[in-house]
Image (cartoon, helix red, strand yellow):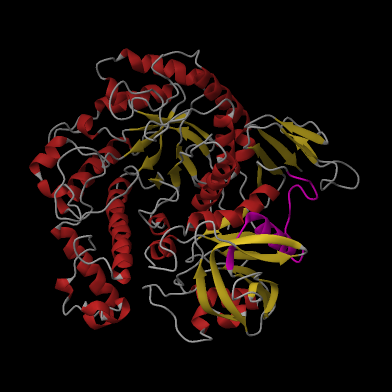
Amino acid sequence: MNVQTEKILPKFTHLLYGGDYNPDQWFDNPEILTRDIELMKKANVNCVSLGIFAWAKLEPKRDEFHLEWLEEIINRLHLEGIYTILATPSGARPRWLANEYIEVLRVDERGKRAHFGGRHNHCISSKKYRERVYKIDAMLAKRFGSHPAVIMWHISNEYEGECHCNICQDAFRGFLKQKYGSIEKLNSAWWTSFWSHDYTDFAEIESPTSIGENSINGLLLDWKRFVTSQTTDFMNNEIVAVKKYAQDIPVTTNMMGLSDVLCYPKLAKKLDIISWDSYPEWHEPGKNIYQGVLESFTHDYMRCLKKQPFILMESTPSTVNWRPVCKIKKPGMHRLSMLNAIGHGSQSAMCFQIRQSLGGAEKFHSAVISHCDSENTRVFKEVSELGKELSLLSEMIYKTYNKADVAIIYDKENKWALDNSCGPRNAGLDYNRECVSYYAYFWKQGINVDVIDSSSEIDGYKLVITPMLYMYHNNIQEKIRKYVDKGGYIISTAFSGYVDENDLCFWGENNKERLSDVYGIWVEEIDALYDGEYNQTCLNGKEYKLDTLCEIVHCTSAKSICDYGKDFYKGKPVVTVNDYGLGKAYHMASNPEQSLINELLAMILKEICIDVVLANTNIPDGIGIVSREDDEKKIIFIGNFSEDEQEIKLDKMKMDDSKKMLYNIDGSTADETISFGPYEMKMLIEK
């Protein structure tokens, strides 16, 4: 599904460029605003996020509101062509609120209430906190909802965390009662008879804790689902407040990529636009290319939460302040990472922050304007050059979209279940890496991928991959069965389809709930390998290592493509394929090295007609390719994520018989050989 981008930000149909701006930290230096505007214009900034942590300045005492300073700043920025994403300030409350209403402070899993301080430590169920948040949000919406400079609502900031207070415990019990209806059904779904942990009443249920119940996986899963549900409801309370006075302004909240705290597809249903905060660990020796793949995967996950372009709300122009080692971005990396985000569907290149703070926890987090207060820094020059480039590319890129024939299912609830599966390995099951290892092949080949969760529809894709989909829920079995029956190709991997949504194992030799009919196999055992221990297999004359998990598989209707090379299950299938209806279902019974994944995917793609951007071109390691298109053109983003110089020869590229169809971004014909410096991004146009 492709959504016209004009509908996303109706007031501003250009690429957003700017970042978090915190003028409320500079009340003692009013001349700073003038200086900031001067430098923002030199940096080609066209948008800022305002008010994210400004509650104490907006409402210093209960019901004493001061919005005039914010209005002055919005007006002055707008006069200079700089638009505003206006935030609601619920991420960090003022001290008076905690002093007057102790219930707004969270209680941890051991029953200890937090003191005032930090951020994101509010109770998500507190009626008092919701009332105060609604009031300040509505005040902001009433004052600024019709302001021509305000283009989007930034709802709170990086929702996260949980509260175990009595209010939340009661809300959790209500959540469970609505879901299960009776305590008997809950006991059955959670298998509470294990260790004699049956409940006799919903009132007996408490949130999972290290000093209480934490061995019932159904409880652990439902608690996480409740936290997501309650956070979504809290967020919706804010959305209702701003929409009361500003129905036409879209709402977003900044997510945190692949964070395990919340199930983002649930939050996404309440939002108009998806945005997220991106902070990869660039330049760690030997890991930069993987970071590029992981970052691209996450962009595609964010884009697919609503199947439309997203907003990159935060990134760093150079370094963060909160890692053990806070490495600066080397020359070129900021441009590469920002253009890569845009290539994968972002409509912005926003950063944290515009001006560096003088004090506090983030005083050493980099900014467009550093403590030097100078335009002569390397970072400021790079940011300015990128802003100039994006202003020229904006019209060309803004109306394009990402079209994908391949989908990878990345399911957050599945990861929660995996992390508490209690075997076969309780360390080293890296779900994110498993998903990214299949994604990496397409990233290098320039084949766009949608990263979806199991609640999404899969019809319309030519290939769907379900890495380590341990938990089957959201009716995924029926979706897969119909998809393959109609001609789709699917790949399943080791430790997939073992449990239902409550972490109860499927049982029976040929259980259709495990899709044994679709894959034509049944799994007898699963062997966990120690770190450094390997099995092996052979495909097309090449040997490959297998690690982590090895399923012992029996074929019913499937055919084996390659087998285990050693141990007592030598000769048993590793990779199988089954004809089902008009389609094919593949299963990878182990965790293979990347080269075997590449080999298998290359084999499958020979059977499927999927557009490859750089067909028959030898792509060196470290190059990542993605494309956006509209009815007239395709824009190809080619990034070098390695620290080495690279080149691509285009002499065998897909071309028209009569003329070359590939052009540089300036309209000139592309050369047959394209050279890349370290961390360099280049763009081509295919007409």
One can see residue 226 in this view: yes
Badge count: 0
Residue 468 in the image: x percent, y percent? Answer: 51, 65
Is residue 49 depicted above or below 400 in this figure? above
* Residue 226 image point, x, y percent: 29, 62
Q: Quick check: 342 left or right of 194?
A: right
Q: 179 left or right of 423?
A: left
Q: What stretch is highlighted in magenta?
A: 590-619
Q: Residue at x 23, y 35 (%)?
A: 55
Residue 342 magenta: no
* The residue positioned farthest toward the left in the image shown: 100
Q: Quadrant of the C terminus?
A: top right
- Measured as percent of width and height from the top left, residue 193 is found at 26, 81
Q: Which quadrant holds residue 209?
A: bottom left
Residue 204 in the image: x percent, y percent? 15, 72
- Using the rendered view, name the quadrant where residue 593 is placed: bottom right
Q: Is residue 606 magenta?
A: yes
Name the one closer to the observer, 640 or 419. Answer: 419
**Residue projecting furthest to the front:** 567
Q: Can you see residue 10?
A: no
Residue at x-position 36% and y-position 55%: 262
Name the residue furthest right.
658
Picture layout, residue 573 above or below residue 251: below
In the image shown, does 592 or 474 lie closer to the viewer?
592
**Quarter location, residue 668:** top right
Q: Quadrant of the N terminus?
A: bottom right
Front in this rendered view, residue 630 or 610: 610
- Tell me if residue 497 comes above or below residue 413 in the rendering: below
